[in-house]
Every structure is written in structure tokens, then in C-alpha cells.
Image (cartoon, grey):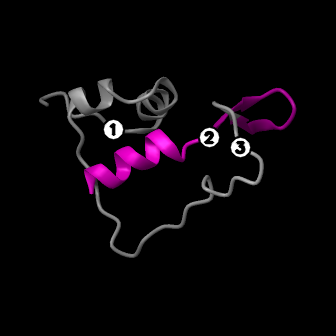
Amino acid sequence: MNDKLLAELCDNTYVMLKPSRVEGIGVFAIRNIPLGCRAMFSTAERDDEWTTLTRDQVAHLPDHARLLIQNYCLYDALR
């Protein structure tokens, strides 16, 4: 499961939600999006579960992926 999540964060993460002056919240590109890219529209899986990553795994992610984890994920202070 971790490998799949790490690959998704590294390879298929293109946008994030942020406050917007236009409509309150907006979808903003956080890296270049290739023409015709549909990878950002993932589907939930029935057996989705919590995924645990080590701090070292997070530290080795690209900047855009680390930003998403810092903004949207829960941290266990003991790990």
C-alpha cells in the first residue's frame, strides 16, 4: 500500500485546494500538468484504509508531494 501511495504522490499529483479570492476556495496547479493528463482524477477503492508512512519516506518525496502531506495528512507524534 505504501509503495502505491508514494508513487501516486510522486507521479500523479498535480493540483491542490487553496483559499481563493475569486470563489473562496480554488483548485491550483502545484506542478506542470501535461497536455491531456487525466491522472489527477483518481477513484476511491472500496477497501481504502489508513496508510502509514515513515518520516524518511516523506522526506524523500518531491516538494509538491511533501506539501500535500504537510497540509492534508495526520501525523503521529510518536513516530
**As drawn, which residue projects farthest toward the left?**
78
x and y, in percent, of residue 66 in the image? 42, 28
Q: Which residues are magenta?
A: 1-28
The answer to which image quadrant residue 52 occupies is: top left
- Check whether the beta carbons of the residues at disc 3 and disc 2 lie within 8 A of each other: no
Task: Name the residue beneath numbered marker 2.
Answer: 14
| Dot placed on the residue nearer the N-terminal end, 1 or 3 | 3
Q: Secondary structure at mark 2?
A: loop
x and y, in percent, of residue 1 in the image? 27, 57
Task: Find the distance from the CA under tag 1 to the CA under tag 2.
Answer: 21 Å
Q: Residue at x 14, y 31 (%)?
A: 79
Q: Nearer the viewer, residue 31 or 18?
A: 31
| Dot placed on the residue nearer the N-terminal end, 3 or 2 | 2
Task: Find the distance from the CA under tag 1 to the CA under tag 3.
Answer: 30 Å
x and y, in percent, of residue 12 in the image? 54, 47
Q: Amino acid at mark 1?
A: Leu
Task: Name the residue beneath numbered marker 3.
Answer: 34
